[in-house]
Image (cartoon, rainbow, N blue to C red):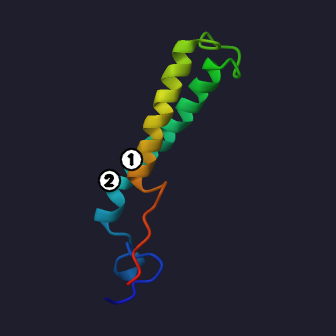
Amino acid sequence: MAFKGPFPNVGSGGRLTHDTVGPHCGVGILGLLSLWIGVIWTLQGLNVWHGTVMSGSARWLTIGVVLDVVAILLLVRAGLLLRRRPVKR
């Protein structure tokens, strides 16, 4: 097997191929957005972020933590967290 360089998903001419970018990019963006919203809701539920109706509410703390867990799973699925390293042979 030939060495493909540090970026094995790059096709000829340095372009990223559709099958390597498409689905994972969308999942990654959704994961990052979900994590951002989940952290805000968690901080509001913990009454760290003041000034809203959601501040100090156990409901928004629970929703925020659940959304954070889902977001982390999405980021793992997209390959942004816990990337698998290729096996050296």
Q: Are marks 2 and 1 in contact (CB under 8 Å)?
A: yes
| Image coordinates for residue 75, horizontal then vertical, percent | 45, 48
Disc 2 is placed on an element classified as: helix
Callout 2 amino acid? Pro
| Image coordinates for residue 37, horizontal then vertical, percent | 54, 31
Residue at image point 48% right, 55% down: 80
Question: With 20 as the anchor, is 67 left or right in this view?
Answer: right
Work out which quarter of the rendered image holds the C terminus and state it: bottom left
Residue at image point 52% right, 37% down: 35
Label disc, if present, on residue 27 of the rendered structure: 1
Name the outermost residue toward the bottom: 2
Q: Is residue 3 above or below residue 25?
A: below
Mark 2 and mark 1: Cα distance apart in space: 6 Å
Disc 1 is placed on an element classified as: helix
| Image coordinates for residue 50, horizontal then vertical, percent | 71, 17
Callout 1 amino acid? Val
Q: How many marks?
A: 2
Residue that mark 2 sits on? 23
